[in-house]
Amino acid sequence: MERSRFPVPKKEIRILGLSIAKTKFGLLVTGVVFRGNLWLDGVVCGLIKTHTQDRINRISSIIKESKQFSQLHAVILTNTESISDRELDQLAEAAKIPVMALTNKRPVKKLRHKVRSFDLQVNGTRMSVLAASIEKEEAKEILGIGSKPGGKTPEATRIADLVMKEMNFTSFRL
C-alpha cells in the first residue's frame, strides 16, 4: 500500500482557507491559516488585476508568502466562481500543495483536468468538493479536522469569508 504524501498526524494541522472575490480593482484574495478548527495562525491578502495572464502564479505566490506555508497541509477555497477546474489544478501544481474548492454543485463525473469531484459527509454535513492533488479519504480527513462538529464549512474558510465580506464593504467601497 502506497504511503500518503501528506500524512495527517494530529488534530491541529494548518489549513489555509482562501476566499476570492471580484472587485472593480481586480481579484481580491483573502486567506486565513487555521490550526485545525481551534486557532487562527495568520492572515494573507492580495489584489490581482483580473486581466493578468498569470493570476494563478500570483495566487500561488500569495500562498507561498505566508509564514506558515512550510507547515500547510491543504488550501481550501470558497467563492469558486472566479476560478475554473483547470486553474484549480494549476494552483495545486504551482503551490505544490493539495487544493480543494467547496462548491454547492453535486459531484461532476467528467472534469477536464486532474481535478476530482467528491461528495463527502463530514461531521454530519454534506460537502461537495473539487480536489486537486489529494485523494478522497485525505480530503475527508482534512475537512473533518478543519470543521467544528456540526459546522457547515471548515473554520479557515468561514473566517476567510468573514474577512472578505468586511474588506469588500469597508476598504473597497468608493
Image: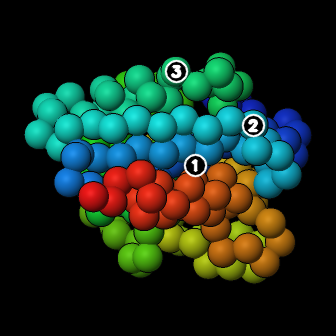
Residue where numbered disc 3 is placed: 65
In the depicted view, which residue is nearer to us: 60 or 174? 174
Q: Where is residue 59 in the image (x, y as percent from the top left)?
A: 37, 33
Q: Choose between 35 and 139: the one closer to the eye.
A: 35
Q: Nearer the viewer, mark 2 or mark 1?
A: 2
Residue 60, located in which quarter of the rendered image? Answer: top left
For label 1, the crowd category at 10 Å Cα-Cα, with few meaning under 14, some 14 to 19 and many 20 or more, is many
Residue 74 x, y percent position in the rendering: 60, 40
x and y percentages locating residue 29 in the rendered image? 41, 44
Numbered badge on residue 83? none
Q: How far apart are marks 2 and 1 (CA)?
A: 11 Å
SS at circle 1: strand
Give the image quarter of residue 61.
top left
Asked which secondary structure carries label 2, the reply is strand
How far apart in space, not on screen, are marks 2 and 3 (Cα)? 14 Å
Q: Which percent across, then down, holds residue 75? A: 55, 42
Mark 2 or mark 1, earlier in chain: 1
Q: How many labels does the image show?
A: 3
Q: Which residue is drawn at 35% across and 54% down?
A: 172
Whether the residues at callouts 2 and 3 have beta carbons within 8 Å, the answer is: no
